[in-house]
């Protein structure tokens, strides 16, 4: 069954694992850097990854977690699609068709229809269409407090993918200043996913935090990543 909250929880775990793996890559990279130092060379602080091998490990790690996130979202999309495709019962279809054939339906009747048959996506959308038609004709009977878990399902999947991709790209390109900054970005991602699930369209904010890099092969120039 499609569930935004459950999908968010899975994505959050993947993001946490991605961040932890990146920190481990950084620690290993610094060990290799220190082991390769020659006498008299200046020791630099940990900072950005210093070796090609570290960059390649980070790239591979991030791509692994990107694939895991894509699999979670693909499952969510399939679940939503399956539920949307479920045929309504004959009783539900007959009842709603009868309502739709009338020139006016009361709010009480619409509320009852939503509660009795609105768990089916096709019926739910038909009832919303009846509601909208009445409003256009000057007989508003808006039903509030009742919604479908499938409302905005595909938009949720699309926006959640953008958010998790941007976070992983931010890790991949080491855009965080330090471990605390990375944790802050992780918290912001989780807040963003929750907002997307509620239908708040602010996923694009993440681009301002993580820079919105697209995925790509590791750069051969270590210095190009900057401090």
Image (tube, grey):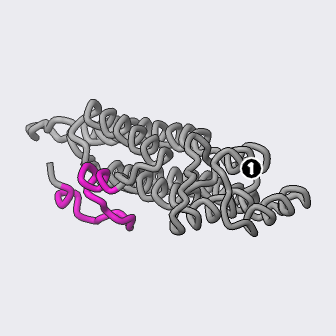
Residue under the image location 70 percent in, 62 percent down: 81
Q: Residue at x 45, y 48 (%)?
A: 196
Is 8 placed above or below 150 here? above
Rendered image quadrant of residue 47: top left
Quick check: can you spot residue 30? yes
Q: Is 205 a magenta residue? A: yes
Residue 18 lies left or right of residue 36; in this view the side is right
Q: How many marks?
A: 1
Mark 1 surroundings: few (<14), some (14-19) or many (≥20) residues within 10 A: some
> Quick one: 101 or 213, which is closer to the camera?
101
Query: Residue 93, position in %: x, y?
Result: 84, 62
Give the side of residue 171 with respect to residue 115, left or right: left
- x and y, in percent, of residue 61 in the image: 47, 50
Question: Of helix, strand and loop, which one carries label 1?
Answer: helix
Q: Nearer the viewer, residue 71 or 24?
A: 71
Taking the image as drawn, is residue 10 in sight?
no
Q: Is residue 200 left or right of residue 64?
A: left
Q: Which residue is mark 1?
A: 113
Q: Nearer the viewer, residue 156 or 28?
A: 156
Image point (51%, 50%), residue name: 65
Q: Which residues are magenta?
A: 204-225
- Residue furthest to the top in view is 180
Using the image as rendered, state which of residue 217 and residue 125 is in the foreground: 125
Residue plotted at (18% across, 61% down): 224
Residue 176 percent location from the top left of the image: 25, 43
Q: Is residue 113 left or right of residue 225?
A: right
114 in magenta: no
């Amino acid at each position: 069954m499609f569930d935004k909250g459950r999908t968010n929880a899975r994505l959050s775990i993947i993001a946490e694992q991605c961040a932890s793996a990146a920190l481990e890559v950084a620690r290993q990279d610094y060990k290799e850097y220190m082991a390769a130092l020659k006498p008299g060379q200046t020791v630099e602080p940990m900072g950005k990854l210093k070796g090609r091998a570290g960059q390649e490990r980070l790239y591979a790690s991030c791509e692994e977690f990107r694939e895991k996130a894509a699999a979670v979202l693909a499952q969510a999309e399939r679940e939503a699609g399956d539920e949307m495709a479920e045929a309504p019962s004959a009783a539900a279809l007959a009842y709603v068709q009868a309502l739709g054939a009338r020139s006016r339906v009361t709010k009480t009747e619409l509320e009852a229809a939503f509660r009795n048959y609105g768990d089916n996506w096709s019926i739910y959308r038909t009832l919303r269409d009846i509601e909208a038609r009445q409003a256009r004709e000057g007989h508003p009977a808006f039903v509030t407090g009742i919604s479908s878990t499938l409302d905005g399902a595909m938009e949720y999947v699309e926006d959640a993918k953008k958010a998790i991709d941007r976070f992983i790209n931010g890790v991949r390109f080491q855009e965080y200043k330090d471990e605390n900054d990375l944790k802050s970005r992780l918290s912001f991602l989780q807040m963003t996913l929750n907002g997307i699930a509620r239908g708040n369209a602010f996923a694009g904010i993440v681009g301002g935090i993580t820079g919105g890099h697209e995925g790509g092969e590791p750069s051969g120039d270590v210095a190009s990543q900057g401090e």
